[in-house]
Amino acid sequence: MRIEKERILLYDRNKQEDLIMKYFMVEGMLKNVDKLNDEIMKQHMAYTQKAMDEGMIFLSGLKKDQSGGVFLIKSDTEERLKEYLDHEPMHLHGIQDYRYVEFDAHYISEDSHWFS
């Protein structure tokens, strides 16, 4: 199925601005796993779930080698993505750094069992 660019309407003092959402693939890279504890993990999971509930994150998961995580995220600006990552609990506690790349989504599978 071909994907049409998602548009979002923002209102700024009676001015309507039409923005196209940007898509990012984000990789988390663990750098100090010794700092990780149950409380920080709960904060991380809650922060991620909130972004998923708001429709910002499409999927999230742990890399097979457990050296960090990956997720697909959308944001109206790169600056907003950076703000999200800067406030991520694993980053705030010096446990994980992030790198990302913006991409254009052209097609998506109609197979609802893709992750099965």
Image (cartoon, helix red, strand yellow):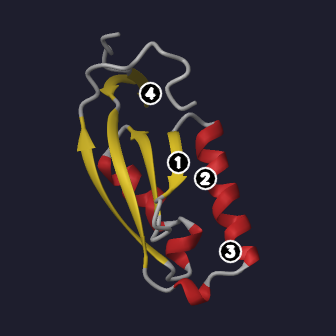
Q: Residue at x 45, y 67 (%)?
A: 65
- Quadrant hosting residue 22: top left
Disc 1 element = strand
Q: Are marks 1 and 2 in contact (CB under 8 Å)?
A: yes
**On screen, 103 above or below 79?**
above
Q: Quadrant of the C terminus?
A: top right
Q: Which residue is mark 3?
A: 40
The answer to whether any part of residue 14 appears in the image is: no
How far from the left and from the top, in percent, is residue 99? 31, 62
Name the amino acid, label 4: Tyr
Q: Residue at x 60, y 41 (%)?
A: 52
Q: Which residue is mark 1?
A: 60
Name the amino acid, label 1: Ser
Name the amino acid, label 2: Thr
Quick one: label 2 or label 4, which is nearer the N terminus?
4
How far from the left and from the top, in percent, is residue 81? 39, 52
How far from the left and from the top, in percent, is residue 104? 24, 31
Quick one: label 1 or label 4, which is nearer the N terminus?
4
Give residue 101's mark: none
